[in-house]
């Protein structure tokens, strides 16, 4: 798996950390960031499909 370095504002990282760990939704920061990227890309695909920029699977 490729590693990527990014700069993240402290406020955003603090918000992310609230969702990570034993009491959170994700086991670690990497898991949370990957899930967020997947969800964002899925939403962008849905928008592109609605706008006619890509064809849906059933087209």
Image (cartoon, grey):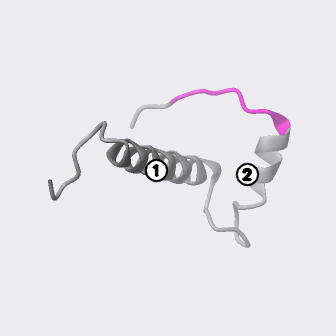
| Comparing labels 2 and 1, the label whose residue is closer to the camera | 1
The numbered mark at residue 54 is none
Give the image location of residue 52, x and y in percent: 30, 41
Where disc 2 sits, the SS reads helix
Work out whether residue 35 or residue 46 is closer to the camera in this orientation and state it.
46
Q: Quadrant of residue 20?
A: bottom right
Farthest-out residue, left = 59
Give the image location of residue 33, x and y in percent: 58, 47
> Who's the residue at 42% across and 46% down the image?
47
Work out whether residue 58 or residue 34 is closer to the camera in this orientation and state it.
58
Q: Is residue 54 above or below residue 28?
A: above
**Is the C-beta separation of discs 2 and 1 under 8 Å?**
no
Please state if 31 lies on the left or on the right of 1 as rendered: right
> Who's the residue at 42% across and 32% down the image?
2
The numbered mark at residue 43 is 1
Work out whether residue 13 or residue 55 is closer to the camera in this orientation and state it.
55
Count of residue discs: 2
Which part of the image, by quadrant, shows the N terminus? top left
Secondary structure that dominates the magenta span: loop
Q: Is residue 8 above or below residue 49?
A: above
- Label 2 Cα neighbours within 10 Å, binned few <14 / some 14-19 / many ≥20: some
Q: Is residue 27 above or below residue 7?
A: below
> Who's the residue at 59% across and 53% down the image?
32
> Who's the residue at 16% across and 59% down the image?
58
Where disc 1 sits, the SS reads helix
Which segment is the magenta one? Answer: 4-10
What residue is disc 2 on? 16
């Amino acid at each position: 798996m490729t590693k990527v370095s990014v700069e993240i504002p402290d406020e955003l990282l603090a918000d992310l950390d609230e969702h990570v760990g034993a009491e959170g939704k994700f086991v670690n920061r990497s898991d949370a960031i990957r899930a967020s990227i997947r969800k964002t890309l899925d939403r962008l695909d849905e928008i592109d499909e609605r706008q006619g920029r890509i064809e849906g699977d059933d087209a």
